[in-house]
Image (cartoon, coloured by chain):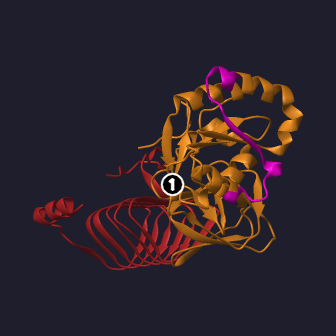
Chain colours: A orange, B red
Amino acid sequence: MNVFIYDDFLKKHTKTVNNTEILLHKLNLNGKIVYLESIRNINDLIRDEVNNGAKTIIAVGNNKTINKVLNGMMSGDNQNIALGIIPIGNNNSIAQTCGIRNEKEACEILLARRIEKIDIGYANKIHFIANAKIKAKGAIIKIDDFSIDQTENGEIIIINLPDKKCSTQNILANPQDGQLNLLINNGGKKYGLLSVQTMELENDREEKLILDESVAIDTPAQIGIGDHQISLIVGKKREFNIN
Amino acid sequence: MFKKDLKPESFKDVETIIGESIRVKGNFNGNGNIIIDGSLEGSLKTKGNVFIGPKAKVTGSIEAQEVIINGEISGNLLVKDYLTVGETAKINGDIECNRISVDTGAIINGKCQMVKVSPSQKEAEVINE
């Protein structure tokens, strides 16, 4: 059974949503529709739906929607429940990375059900699927018994799911290797890169850490890879490589 | 094996890059190839190879399979195989390596000891890997 979790902002995209629902019906991809605004606790909702036989939870919306659904799924032992994506609106870089360019393509991809097991990162108690970002200046990263800081402006990107930009920069991030890739970038060739399992991020400038380009959390933050992977439905043209 | 004129951009399997504006403090342990163009205050140990760029500054010991040095190092070097010392290199510390090449202009202040790795030892290392 499919459970479609609609984000609240989809009210502004009625026509797109209607067309998507028609296409889903044609492809026989029916299921239960739940609006995020009507959910008091997404963890409870997903647990109940899984207990009722849900096999696929589909986030309909943008990166923020995916992150909310992901965090709901990570609250229980849902490794065998697939996470699907139907991107609508702006801020859909995660769908893009997964090879899902638009809502029409998303429906076909859901039907094909190509599943990849993907590591999931965490920052404090919030999970993320793609990356976590923060301004580099003022940030100190502690890993094992060494620390890293950046003397110039730039950005710290903690990568789990690498996008096309990563492959052009020769960043060999793999979302199945149990590691996060730490990229400290201030343009051009001045960057740092290393693979890590856990790290501690401190910041003296009250900058927020942005997860999945949508959720802001406070620092200091304990960041790492979670114990469980997630089953993610991806398109043929996904931008990340799996070895 | 690193070639003498190899540029970091051409490294295909680099595990760690410490860029120019990045400062690392503490003991850094790795398994793969490492490029350092920034500053490292502490020891560096890897099973792979190390490239030290011309603007890099390392204060601490380095232990690796092969090492190319173009920057400044204050610490001892233990290189299991080949050490290349470029013309801009400045080493203040003792060196222990199997093979070495030193460019004109390089500065080395310290003892240099050649340690032979026998073929049987090399084979054993490969089997262990």
Is residue B84 in sight in this rendering?
no
Residue, x 59% and y 39% (percent of image)? A1
> So how many labels did they put on this image?
1
Q: Quadrant of residue A40?
A: bottom right
SS state under label 1: loop
Residue interval drawn in magenta = A23-44
- On the image, the x and y values in percent for residue B88 come to 49, 61
User: Left or right: where does residue B28 sit relative to residue B64?
Assistant: right
Q: Quadrant of residue B84?
A: bottom left
Q: Nearer the viewer, residue A40 or A125?
A: A40
Residue, x 33% and y 61% (percent of image)? B66
User: Left or right: where does residue B112 sit relative to residue A192?
Assistant: left
**What type is the residue that disc 1 sits on?**
Gln
Q: Nearer the viewer, residue A214 or A18?
A: A18
Q: Chain of mark 1?
A: A
Residue, x 41% and y 48% (percent of image)? B5
- Relative to A59, is B88 above or below? below
Q: Quadrant of residue A182?
A: bottom right
- Relative to A5, is B129 above or below? below
Residue B67 located within the stretch drawn in magenta: no
Q: Nearer the viewer, residue B82 or A140?
A: A140
Is residue A15 in sight in this rendering?
yes
- Relative to B9, is A204 above or below? below
Q: Nearer the viewer, residue B91 or A201?
A: A201
User: Left or right: where does residue A163 sit relative to residue A42?
Assistant: left
Q: Which residue is mark 1?
A: A229
Residue farthest to the left, as pictured: B120
